[in-house]
Structure formats: structure tokens, C-alpha cells
Amino acid sequence: MTPPLQPSSPMARWEHFPHGADIGLRGFGATPEEAFEQAARALTAAVTSARVAARVAVDVRCEAPDLELLLVEWLNSLIYEMAVRRMLFAAFSVRIDGARLEGTLFGEPVDVARHAPASEPKGATYTALKVARDDAGVWSAACVVDV
């Protein structure tokens, strides 16, 4: 599978929001999938501002009873793969079908000298957890990540 190079819609973007010693992540998109992909980009941006190459693909699967809990599972799956594989990820592909998410992470092994990791995410939390569509049709996916 080839990594997505550009977001699929002009709505796609991400942001960080302050939350004490932790960091808030919020992704936006035309679909829940795109918002989840952007939230994952925000997670990587919390770790490094360096360019991360999309060289290796890693598949992940998770389930949860609703979209908000699925966001936490998705981000925790990403955090797990970052830790055990010692990788950072640059691009993401998400497919949601009901309570199931199938995703692909595209990244490379951490190069401490080049990536200069600024933080180590420990886990996505239920704090500020919200996945919703606004009146303009833009989906957002947000939560606080313990760093």
C-alpha cells in the first residue's frame, strides 16, 4: 500500500491544544477517518518537528463501541507501535466500519540525532475526548495524550 501524500480534502488539518503537562491533539477532516488520520499527524508532531519518511508500512486494527473510544484505541495503537518498533510515522490511512478500525501507519525507525524527539507519548486519555461533526460538516477528533 502506498502512503497518502496529501490529505484527501481541504478540511484536513490538525492542531495541538494546551493541557497542563500533557498535550491535547485535535484532527479535522471531511470524514471521521480523515479526522483520525489528522489526529495521528498531530501525535507525531508532538514528538518531533523533523521530517519523517514514510518508508515502512505497519497495519493496525482496533475496536470500540463508539467513535470516541475508537479514537483512544487508534491513538494508543499508534503509541504502542511507536514504542515497540522504535519508529515514527508520517502518513496514515484509516478505514472505519462500525465499531472496527483498520489502519496503516507509514514511517521509519527513529534516528535520535535527526528526529530529536521532544517527548514520549505514554497514552491517549479520555480527557477532552470528543469526536463530532460541526454544522459546517467538518469532523473533529480530539483528546489529551499523556506525555
Image: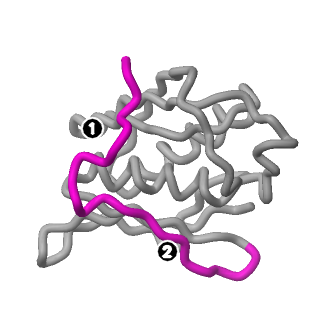
Q: Residue 32 location, x and y as percent?
A: 26, 52
Residue that numbered label 2 is attached to: 128
Assign the C terminus to one quadrant of the image: bottom right
Label 2 Cα neighbours within 10 Å, binned few <14 / some 14-19 / many ≥20: some
Q: Is residue 140 left or right of residue 58?
A: left
Instruction: Work out whether residue 77 or residue 40 is closer to the camera in this orientation and state it.
Output: 40
| Magenta-drawn segment | 1-21
Q: What amino acid is found at the position of numbered circle 2 in the picture?
A: Ala
Q: Is residue 86 left or right of residue 52?
A: right
Name the quadrant containing residue 130.
Answer: bottom left
Task: Give residue 96's mark.
Answer: 1
**Given the current orientation, which residue lies at the most extreme top position?**
1
Assign the N terminus to one quadrant of the image: top left
First reached walking from the N terminus: tag 1 or tag 2: 1
The kind of secondary structure element at disc 2 is: loop
- The coloring applied to the image is one colour
Residue depicted at x 12% and y 75%: 136
In this rendering, is residue 7 above or below 99? below
Instruction: Check if residue 105 falls in the magenta segment.
Output: no
In this rendering, is residue 102 above or below 116? above
Q: Residue 52 location, x and y as percent?
A: 62, 40
Residue depicted at x 33% and y 55%: 35
Instruction: Check if residue 2 falls in the magenta segment.
Output: yes
Q: Residue 108 location, x and y as percent?
A: 65, 28
Q: What amino acid is found at the position of numbered circle 1 in the picture?
A: Ile
The kind of secondary structure element at disc 1 is: strand
Q: Are marks 1 and 2 in contact (CB under 8 Å)?
A: no
Residue depicted at x 80% and y 35%: 111
In this rendering, is residue 48 above or below 131? above
Q: How many numbered marks appear?
A: 2
Q: Tell me the CA gap for discs 1 and 2.
A: 22 Å
Instruction: Work out whether residue 47 or residue 95 is closer to the camera in this orientation and state it.
Output: 47
